Structures are given as C-alpha cells and as structure tokens.
Image: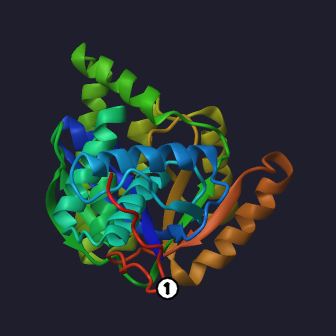
Amino acid sequence: MTVSTNTRACLAGEDLDWLGHRSVCVAVDLPTRIRLCHDDVAEDRGVSRTANAVWRFLRQRGDRVPVRRPSVTVDAEAPLASGLSSSSSLIIGLIRAFTAHLGLPISDETLLSWSFDFEYAICHGGGMDQTAIIRGDAVLTGGRDGTPPLLLGHAPFPAEWRLIVVDSALPKSTVGHLAEARRRHAAGDSGLARYVDRADHAAAAAWSAILAEDLPALVSEVDRAHEAMRDVGMSHPVLESLRDLARREAGLSLKITGAGGGGAMVGVCHASQATAAATRIRAALAARYPRAGVLIARAAPGMPLASAEAAPEPAAAG
C-alpha cells in the first residue's frame, strides 16, 4: 500500500492560525509518499520515531490496533525542514496509511482533528498546515489556539499559475520559533502585534486576489506578507540575499514559507514564465549558494486514496 500526501505553502499569515487571525495557504504537489511493507525494512531513524509515535497515538484511539506496526518507507519530493510542512505531511500520511491498513476508515474531519492533536502536543502550533494539506487547493483559515482553525474559504488555485520554491538549505526550528512567538505574545510584544495586523491584512487581500485570479495583486500581497515577516525578525541574511537574487535575475518576488530563520521561500508566477525563471535562479545560485535548490510546483487538489497494491495483513491485536 502506498499513500501520497500533499505538502503546503503559506502565502500569508504564518502564526496567525493560532494567534486568531487569517492565513492563506496552498496545497502543493510535492508529496510525501509512504509505503507499507510486508517485510521488515531499514527505516530512517526520524521516520521510525515518528511512525512509532503515530502508531501509539492510534492505539489510544482504537481497540483494533495491534502492538506491532507495519514497516514503512518514505519518499519526499519537498525538501525536508523547509517550511513546506513536510512533517505535517508525514504525520497525515502515516495516519492515512495505518488506518487504511487496519481497515479503519476515517473522515477528513477526523483526520484533521487527529493530525492536529498529534502535532499540537509536540509544538503547540496552529492548524493551517493540516487544513491546507487535507482540503487541497487554496484555503483561507481563521486562527484558533488549541483547535484546528476555522475554514473561512476554500477555492481552486488558478491552473495557469505556478509556485516557485527556492530552498535555502539553511536549517530552521519550528518548535523554537513557536516557543519564541508564544513568549512574545504572552508579553504583549508590540512588534508582534504589528506583524499580526500587517499579515492579517495581507492574507485577506491575497485571498481576494486568488478569487479574482489577479496574479499581480497576489504577488503584491505575498511581497507584503514577506516584509511583515522580515520586520518581525523571521528572516535571515541568506534568505534576503536569495530573495534579492530571484528578483534581480528572474523578476520573481519570494516570501518565506513556514517558521522562517531558514528553510524555503516561495513565489507565484504564470506557468509560461516558470521554467525560465527557475532556470535563471538556479544558474545564479550555483556559484554563491550551491546547496540551495529550486523547484516548480503546482497547487494540489484534495488527496487521492491509497493505491491498491497488496498490503500487509494487520497482526492480531495484543
């Protein structure tokens, strides 16, 4: 059995999914593929740790879950720890794969609730990632702390638009960022309050641009959202250098996606310009930032069902 799960890009409103304001995200066709195996396989240590935790989580929610889980292999198209929610994608994919293996069908609502609860216990973040990945296309969310956000809007992302992902290869820490953001929020930090106001307005305008299929307007709002992140301290000199390079070489505006401080940035352009823009950016990166990468992605619809290849039989519960 193989399960393919979207990742996501945030176009405006990082942290607003738990701070109580609006965020705009797009599901991205850079999937995480999870394969359940008949035989024991050598698992990546991080994957094994997450798979074990998800299996324990499921055992707490059902009496048909045996002690031993199936082995898994993972293939990820999105760069890891880049702000494209590869960790949320892995967790959602594991829940989907394991429940399908066990013959325990779950609704999208339950999948959203379980995947959110699993991650919230670890990092106390919001739920825009899970919402975008599961719903697919573009989503507008209204933040709530401790529970998945409200789905304020759900719409197709125009088919002729592309997402250009520039991965800096700089490490980032979502857990560390969230802890710092929560500290600033609890202290009534005025800089964070200004960020919330700017990012919320950018998210609202970005959503209007998506609905109107107005690419220049969306690019402008994505730019505003990045500037708000930069001014609150979520950027990094290397990210700003990459952003300047992309604008200079390809006329492309980039925005941090995710916690910032490293990871990837994302820009939106017309499909007819995507290949040329990516090629120019790659060429310019080669000398100064050889570890950086560039990907072209489409928005992704809601997730497909697990593929119908033979799956290992569940072991007896114990």
Residue 148 visible, this orientation? yes
| Image: 226 above or below 204 | above
For image coordinates 54% across by 60% down, the residue present is: 71
205 and 169: which is toward the camera: 169
Question: For the residue carrying disc 1, how many other residues have a C-alpha within 10 Å: few (<14), some (14-19), or many (20+)?
Answer: few
Q: Relative to the observer, which residue lies in front, 149 or 309?
A: 309
Residue in view at x 39 percent, y 72 percent: 215
The residue most toward the right is 287
Q: Is residue 141 left or right of residue 218?
A: left
Q: Residue shown at 38%/38% (left/top)?
A: 228
Determine which quarter of the picture holds residue 20: top left
Q: In this view of the protein, can residue 218 be seen by the observer?
A: no
User: Which residue is denoted by mark 1 in the rendering?
Assistant: 309
Relative to 117, is 247 on the left or the right? right
Q: Determine the image quadrant of residue 295.
A: bottom right
Q: Amino acid at mark 1?
A: Glu
